[in-house]
């Protein structure tokens, strides 16, 4: 009997914090699985996921009514409440998919003036609701497992801006591996566990339709005590805190030679492109060492005059410094000869 009382107490605690648990796990999920979505519409996309999960929950609860009992302690039991619950249930089951479709239309910029596409979006809401709702159900299992793994192994995760400039994620993985090797970390490409890959595969098709954005979970870069996962607009570094910091610095230095943006706004990316252009022109002997150094110094002054964040200035400064060091090292070696 005491065991059953303890179990009831545990279930009551879970019920009491159901919403809080859901919000917490959803926060973990955005960091683990989605990466950095476009700020403009990510709130709407998260609303789509939550509504879709509610829809799936109601459908499953229809088959297994015990799931509705989670909330019975908070709902007064009387005839008026009973009617209200039935109306709410019908509204959710019937209304959520079209609502999800309408949110999808808003995100993709489809308006009522284009009646055909607008109706298609509403109908598509049923597919979105089914896929996003099931994905969220899987995420509610996978995210805590990954979080617990991090806590037990004392590892941290850090997101880092990165925009692939047309060559694809496999190319980016090769560049990451080359950057890590420069600080003595050997790495390889591995296939991630289902806990990382399954929710992403369920949701990537919709993210591609809405944002032209995907999280690549076919492979990831695995080094000693550090892993790197790639999305369309950022990368996630996971490992011991000191190694994550070292790896981040190495990637910034390594990517200065490639057409991959590590900042996330147009102004900063223009400067990144100028740094990259100076480096390539100098490497191809189109400009002299002195011209390269002077141009880089001007860029260094510009980034402190421009309106940008401290992190953007720091990152661009590291890139400029890395190119300057390359130029000066070659110049010194040449003069020594």
Image (tube, rainbow, N blue to C red):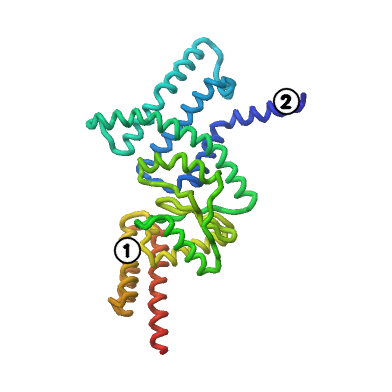
Number of disc labels: 2
Q: Residue at x 55, y 44 (%)?
A: 194
Rendered image quadrant of residue 258: bottom left
| Mark 1 nearby-residue class (10 Å; few <14, some 14–19, many ≥20) | some
- Circle nearer the N terminus (1, 2): 2
* In the image: residue 13, left or right of residue 210: right
The residue closer to the viewer here, 62 or 148, is: 62
**Residue 178 sits above or below residue 131 on the image:** below
Q: Residue furthest bottom?
A: 337
The residue closer to the viewer here, 252 or 84, is: 252
Q: Residue at x 28, y 76 (%)?
A: 286
Report which residue position mark 1 lands on. 273
Rendered image quadrant of residue 117: top left
Q: Residue at x 52, y 61 (%)?
A: 245
Q: Position of residue 80 (x, y in %)?
A: 49, 11
Rendered image quadrant of residue 1: top right
Q: Residue furthest top?
A: 79
Secondary structure beneath label 1: helix
The residue closer to the viewer here, 336 or 265, is: 336
Report which residue position mark 2 lands on. 5
Q: Residue at x 39, y 23 (%)?
A: 95
């Amino acid at each position: 009997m005491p065991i059953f009382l303890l179990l009831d107490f545990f279930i009551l605690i879970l019920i009491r914090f159901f919403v809080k648990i859901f919000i917490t796990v959803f926060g973990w999920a955005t960091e683990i699985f989605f990466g950095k979505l476009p700020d403009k519409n990510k709130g709407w996309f998260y609303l789509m996921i939550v509504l879709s999960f509610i829809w799936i929950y109601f459908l499953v609860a229809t088959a297994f009514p015990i799931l509705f009992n989670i909330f019975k302690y908070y709902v007064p039991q009387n005839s008026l409440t009973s009617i209200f619950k039935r109306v709410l249930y019908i509204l959710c089951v019937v209304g959520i998919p079209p609502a999800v479709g309408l949110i999808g239309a808003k995100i993709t910029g489809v308006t009522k003036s284009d009646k055909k596409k607008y109706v298609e979006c509403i109908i598509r809401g049923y597919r979105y609701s089914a896929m996003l709702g099931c994905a969220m159900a899987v995420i509610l299992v996978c995210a805590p497992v990954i979080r617990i793994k991090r806590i037990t192994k004392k590892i941290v995760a850090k997101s880092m801006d990165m925009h692939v400039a047309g060559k694809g994620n496999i190319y980016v993985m090769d560049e990451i591996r080359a950057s890590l090797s420069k600080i003595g970390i050997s790495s390889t490409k591995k296939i991630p566990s289902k806990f990382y890959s399954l929710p992403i595969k369920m949701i990537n098709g919709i993210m591609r339709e809405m944002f032209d954005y995907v999280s690549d979970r076919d492979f990831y870069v695995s080094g000693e005590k550090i892993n790197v996962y790639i999305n369309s607009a950022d990368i996630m570094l996971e490992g011991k805190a000191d190694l994550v910091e070292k790896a981040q610095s190495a990637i910034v230095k390594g990517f200065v030679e490639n057409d991959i943006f590590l900042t996330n706004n147009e102004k900063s990316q223009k400067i990144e492109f100028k740094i990259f252009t100076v480096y390539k022109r100098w490497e191809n002997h189109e400009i002299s060492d002195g011209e390269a150094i002077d141009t880089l110094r001007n860029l260094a002054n510009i980034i402190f005059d421009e309106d940008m964040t401290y992190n953007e200035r720091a990152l661009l400064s590291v890139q400029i410094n890395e190119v300057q060091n390359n130029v000066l090292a070659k110049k010194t070696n040449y003069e020594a000869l």
